[in-house]
Amino acid sequence: MNDFDYIKPGEVYLDGSCQSLRPRQVINAISDYYEKHNSCGERVKYEWGRITDEKVEATREKVLKFLGLKSRNFTVSFTLNTTYGINLLLNQLDPKYFDKVMTSEIEHNSPFLATIAFSKKNNLPRIVMKRNDDGSIPLEEYDFKKAVVVVNCASNFDGRKLGNINELIKKVHKESGIVIIDAAQAMAHSSDVLYKTDADAICFSAHKLYAPSLGVIVWKNELLEKLQDYFLGGGMVDDVDKESYMLSADNSEHRYTRFESGLQAWGEIIGLGAALDWLEGLKKKDKENLKKNAEDLYEFLKSSPKVHLINNEPNPTMSFYVEGIDSHLLGEALSRENIMARTGYFCAHYYLDHVCKYPPLIRFSLGYQTKPEDIEKVKNALAKVIK
Ligand SMILES: Cc1ncc(COP(=O)(O)O)c(C=O)c1O
């Protein structure tokens, strides 16, 4: 694939779990916005603004289509990133509807810390659930009565998925709770786990989906009843009096404004639309290549004697450490060979450091730009270091 034509020969980018590389089509879509119709969305009457509105609206529709969801049930709002989305939601949930907040041990700090804050602010207990090795939650061990459950559906260190997501959602709904899914790591390569989901909200970062830096909250329309107004500003109201206001979100056509205070990142939103088109246009061969590259690297790591691999199965995201070698130094050694990988605990400190007591790790996260020769290069570089 040459949609990443800016990668120089020999450069191997393996940090897509943090930020995907953006295909040329996405970069062009953003440039087009700045060069051809730079304008504020939803407010202006001139032609540039009309084009922006059309493309922003189309992006909302593409997000729903990507997830197999319908606008009569779900709304798409844009924000800064996954972290911001989760915090915006939790900070505005009316606590009178809930008895507790629940998260899981393998979470990124984004939901992990936000649920601590929610628990403290509302004086509600917080439960940290276990996850099985395959990523599922042992549902029978927990009481979900009136719970706000905030969990990922794919981990950021080994990609393990929440395989029983539908059972979880059903069980929580039966007990009058809600489920907020952190889909930051699922959207690019594991979105199947979310297809036609019945979760109450899904937060993700477009920058991990081959798109520009942007956050997205896909939320159930009925969640509106459980929200308090705590984060308000321009673009959210139809009328304002001295001490009162009329929220635009009360009109179903503008429901998305509920989380969109102030001017939005119009160019980035349009870039997300281009990324979703690009993903839809990928060939079977592109997906097979990614799978094969991940399997190849996984098998190599699994069979290397000093390598402790965290993954139980191949995934484009994989983490490990090498016995006797500091991961940060290893990361620097790889960098000298133009291989870009992440080291540390990847903001999953609680699980990786405190539960598993691993030393700092190294993470490879592959993407559609990864070529078989990149994998060969990584294997050779690692073999040299390990020896
Ligand atoms: C599983 C998971 N959740 C949340 C986040 C936070 O994403 P952001 O920094 O874009 O808010 C990340 C980032 O790596 C992640 O991997």
Image: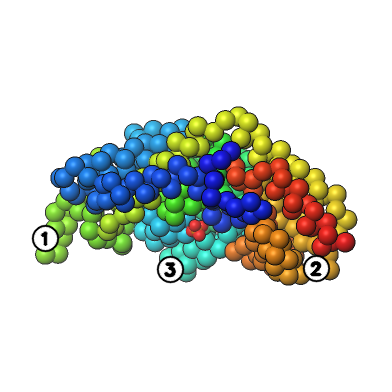
What residue is at 74 percent from the left and 53 percent from the top? 378
Residue at the spot of label 3: 121
Q: Counting residues from the N terminus, which is met first, the one under dot 1 or under dot 2?
A: 1
Of the two numbered discs 1 and 2 in the rendering, the one whose residue sits closer to the viewer? 2
Exactly how many numbered labels are in the figure? Answer: 3
Residue at the spot of label 2: 325
Q: Counting residues from the N terminus, which is met first, the one under dot 3 or under dot 1?
A: 3
CB of residue at label 2: within 8 Å of ligand 1? no
Residue at the spot of label 1: 241
x, y percent for residue 344: 66, 66
Quadrant of image for the C terminus? bottom right
Of 25 and 279, the residue lying toward us: 25
What residue is at 83 percent from the left and 59 percent from the top? 384
Q: What separation in Å lies between label 1 and label 2 (alpha carbons)? A: 64 Å
x, y percent for residue 9: 64, 51
Left or right of 279, for residue 339: right
Q: Secondary structure at mark 3?
A: helix
Up/down of 204 relative to 252, above or below: below
What residue is at 54 percent from the left and 55 percent from the top? 19
